[in-house]
Amino acid sequence: MLPMLSKKGQVQSLDLFISATVFIILLITLILVWDNFSKRLDTKLAYEDLSEKAIKITDLLVETRGVPDKWEDDADKVNVIGLVSNDRVLSNNKIEEFIDMEYDDVKELFNIEAYDFYFRIIDSNGAIIQVDDNDVELGNKPGLSSKFVITIQRIVLNGGSEVVLEFTLWE
Amino acid sequence: MEVVKLYWNLHYGNKGQVFSLDAVIAIFLVMVVLISAFFMVNKENEENYELLQQFNLASDLFTVLDVNGKLDSLNKNSIKTSVENILPKNFDYSFRLECENKIIESNRSVSSTLVKGERIVVTNNLDLCIVRYGVWPK
């Protein structure tokens, strides 16, 4: 009976060793895959948040006059920034006031304190348009080290010509 | 020796197979869950945003054409030229302008496009029309 008991013990050790090895390999794979998934999910959520904010901001800019309606008369009292006098028709007075605003104040109004933005309006040749001899641009351009960058382009009218309003939101 | 072999076969042979099947099923299930999770997470997150961008582009395009009076001519070639002047070169388009007495349609049907919209247009001759449109990347 003794030799039999001895062999039984050896088999159990081998079985345990193999199963433990398989289990550890699977566990390590699972941890690595889980970590990868969670990073991808974080990226996805951050990107979606950025996209949603950028799209909503451009909707407000090109489809509404802002709140109050004539906020350009007293830009300190603006609650919501809108840049058009009619749907997709830019108002030069609103643009002029907008590009004169403080960058941080605009970020606060857009509720994008955690991000940075760059705004410009370009003509069909890609050149930045001018209003009252000032280039229509505001904000900071994203750099090579920027983590997420999203640019929304909207077609609008300025003085009867089609121009492109470009809003870049980045982190 | 015979006794040992007999003992081995009787007690560990079948038992081992049961554990193997159990392990195979477990690994299979884990793999299915992992692969499903991989596809769920890996699913292109730009998809919805891209479609929304296309919708905004198409909506802007036909709003601007309407406001600028470029749809008033009810002339297919004139409207096509106006669209092509504004639309970024990497996009293609289709439209169908339905008025009371006239229908103008671009070469491709709007119904086949993924992103589409419509807008009611009143021309300077007071024709009431509906323009249905779609844009997509080339």
Image: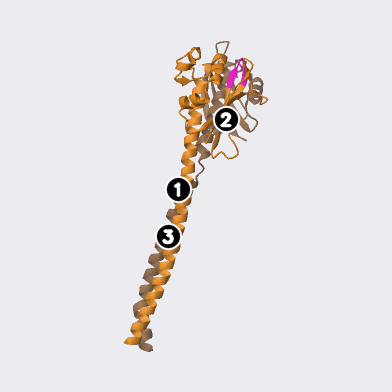
Residue A129 can be seen in this image:
yes
Give the answer, above or below, for where A144 lies relative to B27: above
Q: In which image quadrant can residue A148 be found?
A: top right
Query: Whole-Å distance between the Cαs marked 2 and 1?
Result: 30 Å
Q: Is residue A76 left or right of residue A16?
A: right
| Residue type for callout 1 | Ser
Q: Residue furthest left?
A: A1
Chain B, chosen colour in render: brown
Q: Which residue is mark 2?
A: A140
Question: For the point 64% across and 16% down, which residue is it?
Answer: A133
Chain A, chosen colour in render: orange
Front label number (2 vs 1): 2
Question: For the point 50% across and 26% down, which residue is it?
Answer: A104
| Residue type for callout 2 | Asn
Q: Which residues are magenta?
A: A156-162
Dot 1 falls on a residue whose secondary structure is helix
Q: Main secondary structure of the magenta part?
A: strand
Query: Whole-Å distance between the Cαs marked 2 and 3?
Result: 45 Å
Q: Which residue is mark 3?
A: A27
Along the polypeptide, which appears first: circle 2 or circle 3?
3
Marks 2,1: beta carbons within 8 A: no
Image location of residue A127, percent across then percent down = 66, 24
Q: Chain of mark 3?
A: A
Image location of residue A158, percent across then percent down = 60, 17
Q: Which residue is mark 1?
A: A38
Question: For the point 48% across and 42% down, which residue is it?
Answer: A44
Dot 3 falls on a residue whose secondary structure is helix
Marks 2,3: beta carbons within 8 A: no
Number of marks in picture = 3
* Within-10-Å neighbours for mark 3: few <14, some 14–19, many 20+: few
